[in-house]
Image (spheres, helix red, strand yellow):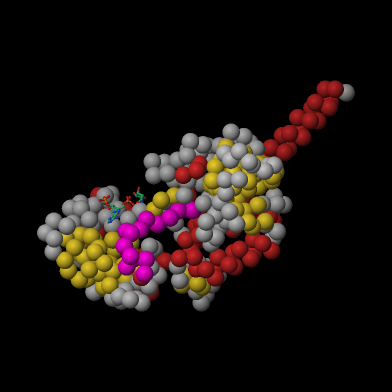
Amino acid sequence: MNEEKQTPERVRCLILGGGPAGYTAAIYAARAGLEPVVYEGPQPGGQLMLTTDVENYPGYPEGVQGPQMMQDFRKQAERMGADLRYGMATEVDFSGPPHKVIIDKTKEIVADVVIIATGATAKKLGLESEERLSGKGVSYCAVCDGFFFKGQEVAVIGGGDTACEDALYLSRICPTVHMLVRRDQMRASKVMQKRVFNTPNIKVHWNTVVEEFLGENELEGIKARNVKTGETFILPVKGAFIAIGHKPNSEIFKGWVEMDEDGYIKTTPGRTFTNVEGVFAAGDVQDKIYRQAVTAAATGCMAALDADRYLAAKEAEESEEVEAQQEGNA
Ligand code: NDP
């Protein structure tokens, strides 16, 4: 920790992350009187800031732009009284409660409860053309963006369960789905692979990598390469869905909070409790299956309710102890 730290700030409820989970937790926590302080992280709004149209979030019958939706969430949290701040957690000490969190390496916060909603980041291939065409045909979420390519030829890059799920989803709305798998086998579960192989309009290209995404302002095709033969070929796709995994933003909690082998924070099934008393987790940092804005928001709500009930029970316990002590002294 930084030697020149300021005096710690004491808060009841600290929320880490400014995506659908964090803002929803903030709305509920503020309304419950927990006076939440929210640190929004390096990209306020989270992954939705990288998407365009969102058509599957209930309540927006005409659809909404991802950044606009996050602005709406943010405004609502602010109106409820949440204290939204720029900055990110850089270190934690969860030996409490209360728990310590260092923000931007300098500021120390001491909180009765912490809600971790730091999200996940989609892994990228690392190509310049991928950056340029991201949101213009290159996407990291088939369920979010697939609909915009209905009736068109598309590609999925990856060979895991997510890639298989994406390919199957797209095969129902697109005439041809090319699946680019970099090895001669998939990492996906056998059952998912079987479903892919049994779907006639999914064409698997083994040992194949993306050399370049083609097009200036919108995707016009993929230049692919077979790594075994060296042969390159063009796939005339309008949409490309990269599904090579996500990385939960959980690095700083390692050693404190229990995680699975991929770094996703473990929560009690159906709840948001972590293994640490007073620390809750919501959204994509604890969800490798659904990863939707609506599921993140839902678990954000759950985390605030769990935190509120935890605090209420703890405070009731403490006041009972005080009463018992007073009675004993009388
Ligand atoms: P995975 O890590 O399981 O798979 C990633 C895939 O992308 C692998 O085929 C990998 O290839 C490939 N890949 C990685 N980097 C590159 C690259 N640079 N270029 C090309 N290909 C690349 O990620 P998933 O998101 O698929 O799944 C994550 C976890 O979530 C898994 O445990 C999965 O089982 C689970 N999951 C479960 C679902 C379900 O139960 N319905 C649905 C979705 C996910 P390689 O094998 O060569 O490394």
Rendering coords of residue 50 (x, y %): 45, 65
Which residue range is magenta in the image? 119-132
Q: Residue furthest right?
A: 330
Image position of 186 (left or right of 165): left
Residue shown at 38%/62% (left/top)?
A: 140
Q: Residue furthest left?
A: 229
Determine if residue 295 is in view. Answer: yes
Residue nearest the viewer, comparing 301 with 14:
14
Determine if residue 309 is in view. Answer: no
For the N terminus, the image quarter is: top right
Q: Quadrant of residue 238?
A: bottom left
Rendering coords of residue 291 (x, y %): 44, 56
Q: Quadrant of residue 131?
A: bottom left
Rendering coords of residue 214 (x, y %): 28, 72
Residue nearest the viewer, comparing 216 with 30:
216
Image position of 314 (left or right of 254): right
Residue shown at 22%/68% (left/top)?
A: 223
Residue nearest the viewer, comparing 301 with 227:
227
Residue shown at 42%/44% (left/top)?
A: 263
Q: Is residue 123 magenta?
A: yes
